[in-house]
Amino acid sequence: MRKEAADRPFFVASAALFVVLVFLAFAQRYYLGWLFRSPHLSLFLQVHGAIMSGWVLMFIVQTGLVETGHVRMHRKLGTVGAGWAALVVTIGTMATLHASIRELRAHTDIAPLQVTITGLELVEMLLFAGFVASAVWLRRRGDYHKRLMLLTLVCMLPSVLPRLPLGLFQSLLSILLAVYVALMLCIAIDTLRHRRLHPAFAFGGATYVLVMQLAFFGMQTPAWHGFLTRLLS
């Protein structure tokens, strides 16, 4: 129990930082669009934004419930969270496929890049689903559960970083490297605090990096581009 309590500031801080990044990334286009007079979003994109935002909100609420000792409420809300995760995967997949369809049918210059991005985002959705499913399965093992849930935020980072102000992360490689740095930083902090590498981070982190590296090269091949182009055109 003492170890669980000692972990709380780390997970609360990680969740809070992610919330700040999400707000900064989508403030101008979504959260404060009315203030910046941004172009009106379609109903689908508004629903997409609401579902993704709902996951982030639920994550910070769940973290706060554990922090304040409301574990029973945390577990009850977890049932809703599992269903919400399914919505995240479904709407996320629809959104990335819709983006590729739009660019391919319009024959835009960025269509090839969008096809690559779509492949990477589909892989991220699979990883997200895998981490959530593993976290639910290991919900009785709090040390595993919370680390696997934190990895779901890592899966969402590639969609957040390129939308941050100043445009620091624009190339696929820079985005992927930044995500790896964030992942390794979380694992390093956790490992130093506990003086051991937790199996959830060891397996989950290695799986994420390996799968995303394979996807990074695989989704840029003519085979993938030809397949998705024929499928969506």
Image: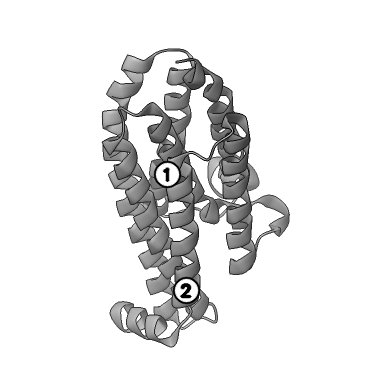
Tell me where residue 99 sits by quadrant: bottom left
Q: Which mark is residue 98?
A: none
- Determine crowd level at label 1: few under 14, some 14-19, many 20+ residues with C-alpha closer than 10 A: many
Q: CA distance from mark 2 to mark 1?
A: 22 Å
- Residue projecting furthest to the front: 195
Residue 90 image point, x, y percent: 30, 53
Residue 1 image point, x, y percent: 44, 15
Which is more foreground, mark 2 or mark 1?
Answer: 2
Q: Can you see residue 219?
A: no
Front-lying residue, 84 or 41: 84
- Residue projecting furthest to the top: 69
Instruction: Tell me the SS state at disc 2.
Output: helix
- Determine crowd level at label 2: few under 14, some 14-19, many 20+ residues with C-alpha closer than 10 A: many
97 up-or-down from 151: above or below:
below
127 up-or-down from 10: above or below:
below
Q: Which mark is residue 52?
A: 1
175 up-or-down from 142: above or below:
below
Q: Amino acid at mark 2?
A: Thr
Q: What residue lies at 41% left-to-right and 55% top-to-bottom? A: 42
Q: Which mark is residue 116?
A: 2
22 up-or-down from 39: above or below:
above
Q: Amino acid at mark 1?
A: Met
User: For the C terminus, which image quadrant?
Assistant: bottom left
- How many numbered dots are placed on residues in this image? 2
Q: What residue lies at 48% left-to-right and 43% top-to-bottom? A: 201
Instruction: Tell me the SS state at disc 1.
Output: helix
Q: What residue lies at 38% left-to-right and 27% top-to-bottom? A: 142
Residue 78 image point, x, y percent: 31, 29
Q: What residue lies at 31% left-to-right and 15% top-to-bottom? A: 72
Of the numbered discs 2 and 1, the one sitting upstream in the chain is 1
Residue 231 image point, x, y percent: 29, 79
Is 16 positioned to the left or the right of 88 in the image? right
